[in-house]
Image: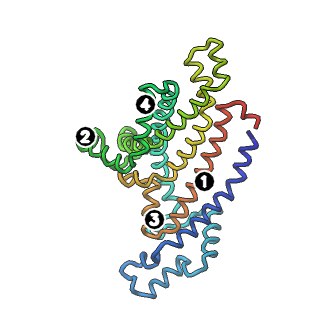
Amino acid sequence: MQGPIGARLVQLLPTILLVSLIVFALQQLMPGDPAVLLAGESAGDPHVIAQIRDQLLLNRPLWYQYLHWLFGVLHGNLGYSWRLSSPVSALIAQKLPVTLQLSLMAFFFAVVIGVPAGVVSAVKRDTAWDWLANAVGLFGLSIPNFWLGIVLILLVSVDLGWLPPSGYVPLAQDPLRSLQTTIMPAFVLGNAIAAVLMRHTRSAMLTALQQDYVRTARAKGLAERTVVLRHALRNALIPVVTLGGLQLGLLLSGAVLTEQVFDIPGIGKLVVDAVFNRDYPVIQGVVLVSGLLYVLINLATDVLYAVINPRLRGG
């Protein structure tokens, strides 16, 4: 396993650098002048605009702006928010735990719903259970997250009054209230991923159940539950783990629409506000941290391969 992990670690730095360079280049294409937005009522004064542009290095060449920011990152400084006048690292440290909690809860829902449904669908192929699991998967793939979120708010919060409709309470402040404010958005996010995991688990299980080692296990007289869970599922989980790692990385990058619908102050909401206000340092910092998390999750996925399938430990 040292080979794949070492290769991932070698790829880490150039991947993050490439992501930061692409984001820096793309955000220059955004319409509007950040200096004009920051000037506010003084936007008509060219001297004020010139002063702001000088302070923010906007009058310098793009390569100089990028290298100046990159030099700060290498020294642990992600810069300062132009709009909030606060360190970007402090903003990310404040918002990231919210997104982490929401993403991990959503991933929990996805795994608990999607993987068992895929296994049952494959084992009970062409039965009512198979049709039901496929119907649930089709529902999750077809329903937009923002629409499902609005419907749940109307039904669960407004009509039934079971859960708060929006807002967020930190987990350290009140664990029970925190779970109440995040369980609906987590279910909305996890629902779509559960559908994808269900479809891939079903496909992988159908392939595994047709393999020779499964027929051999059944010929030895092993219980069907043991054959399915210990032999077929263990080998079928490899592509599912790959997909799960990618989906978790996307969740940690920020669930923009869901955080907006439920008013969750996470990374997604932070970067949306930064885009609207042309707050380039915040955009760069969030994307850099998101890219780093994405690569680390893929590294963890490689390690998990060896845990699931011992034959890969020698590779």
The residue that mark 1 highlights is 292
Q: CA distance from mark 1 to mark 4?
A: 40 Å
Helix, strand or loop at mark 2: loop
4 and 2 marks in contact (CB < 8 Å): no
Q: Quadrant of residue 70?
A: bottom right
Label 3 environment density (alpha carbons within 10 Å; few <14, some 14–19, many ≥20): many
Label 1 environment density (alpha carbons within 10 Å; few <14, some 14–19, many ≥20): some
At label 1, the amino acid type is: Leu
Give whichever of discs 2 and 1 has the lower sequence position: 2
Q: CA distance from mark 4 to mark 2?
A: 33 Å
Looking at the rendered image, the quarter that the C terminus falls into is: top right
The residue that mark 3 highlights is 274
| Viewer-closest of 134 and 19 | 134
The residue that mark 4 highlights is 131
At label 3, the amino acid type is: Ala
Is 59 situated above or below 177?
Answer: below
Helix, strand or loop at mark 3: helix
